[in-house]
Amino acid sequence: KVVEARILFTKETGSTIEIFCLEPDDRYKDVTNAMLQHSKVFWKCLVGGAKKWKSEKLSKPIEINQESIVLDASIVEKKNDYFIIEFNWSNQSISFAELLHHAGIIPLPPYLNRSIEEADKTTYQTIYAKHDGSVAAPTAGLHFTDTIFEKFASKNIHNSYVTLHVGAGTFKPVKASKMNEHEMHAERFEVSVDFLNRLLDGNSGVVAIGTTSMRVLESLYFLGEKVHLGILDDCFVASTDAYDTRFGNISTREALLCLR
């Protein structure tokens, strides 16, 4: 599910700093773990108006359940394409997920060219989204409805789901003149053993909805090959693996069986 990942802070000078929470810092094992943090959390963020934000702490008053809470933000480190921001808040019983829900704004795509509306909290979600943590909806799936899925079922078309974690790369434009000069950001995904079994049992083909879902299927093959070759160190697929002569020597079925 897309969360209210944009937080607007107003400085004492009246200028606005926008903090866009992209993904948890590497100290957390997954998005859910980071979302359930209390009183303090570290997040990878884009910062709008960063030149106006020196080193001072930013504060934002919020009201949750008729209680006044103060959210503070501080810069921990500046990376090439993002900042690591430390968030602190005054009520230790409230999770970061709850805090975002009350303090943040849904990050609509800029091409919509309009302000956020209350209905966007519902309409800018796929109907099958389950876990909080995404900063963008998978656009290719937004048109699905319960009625469409019922029609799929009547035609013996079955659905399987993966969990996609959109990263900073989605928001980074390509500015380099050569492909190898553009820094690619990795994105994470999760699949179940049941999903692998359905891929193995499928005898009429698989259709991926969206480019990120397609990339998951491609990555599963290379991950299986790495298990087969005994070189899977960190469950990582590089963009150059497709050109590595070590790969491409086993079937898709063999690769998926290695993962199962």
Image: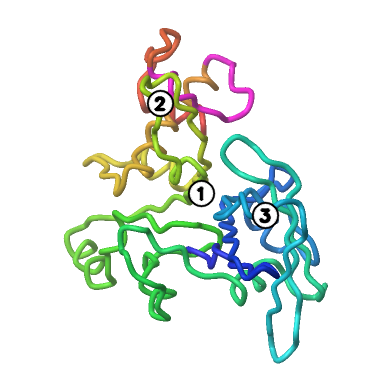
- For this orientation, the residue located farthest to the bottom is 66
Give the CA distance from mark 3 to mark 1.
28 Å
- For this orientation, the residue located farthest to the front is 13
Name the residue located 44 percent from the left edge and 46 percent from the top edge. 171
Q: Nearer the viewer, residue 157 or 122?
A: 122
Work out whether mark 1 precedes mark 2 in sequence or the reverse, and give the earlier one: 1
Q: Main secondary structure of the magenta part?
A: loop
Which residue is labeled 3 in the image?
53
Which residue is labeled 2 in the image?
176
Work out whether mark 3 precedes mark 2 in sequence or the reverse, and give the earlier one: 3
Image coordinates of residue 252 in percent, x first then y, are 36, 26
Residue 237 painted magenta: yes
Residue type at the position of mark 2: Ala
Which residue is labeled 1 in the image?
165
Mark 1 secondary-structure assignment? strand
Residue 221 painted magenta: no
The label on residue 235 is none
Nearer to us of marks 3 and 1 is 3
Mark 3 secondary-structure assignment? loop
Q: Nearer the viewer, residue 208 or 105?
A: 105
Nearer to us of marks 1 and 2 is 2
Q: Which residues are magenta?
A: 229-242
